[in-house]
Amino acid sequence: MERKGNEVHLSDTEARSGSTPHIVRYVLGISLVLAIVALSTVWITGALTH
């Protein structure tokens, strides 16, 4: 931590106060794939039964 007048400057690690295990990337990727599959299934079944 570094002070310059009234400002406090923190490094990335100090500001986060924890680790970043990159699991958010996997959750977002899996969610995107599941959303595409679900919407495609609805669209295809709707087109086939119409």
Image: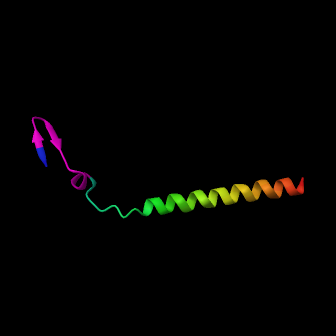
Q: Is residue 13 left or right of residue 31?
A: left
Q: Residue at x 20, y 50 (%)?
A: 11
> Going by the image, does 22 lie left or right of 9?
right
Q: How is the image coloured?
A: rainbow
15 to the left or right of 45 = left
Q: Is residue 24 magenta?
A: no
**Magenta span of residues:** 3-15
Where residue 8 sits, quadrant-wise, is top left
Total marks drawn?
Answer: 0
In the rendered image, residue 7 lying in the magenta stretch gets the answer yes
Position of residue 2 measured from the top left corner of the image (x, y, whole percent) = 11, 45
Most extreme residue toward the right is 50
Residue positioned 36% across, 64% down in the render: 21
What residue do we see at 13% from left, 49% from top?
1
**Residue 16, how many percent across, how many down?**
28, 54
Q: Is residue 7 left or right of residue 36?
A: left
Q: Residue at x 79, y 56 (%)?
A: 44
The answer to which quarter of the image holds residue 42 is: bottom right
User: In the image shown, does 4 or 6 lie closer to the viewer?
Assistant: 4
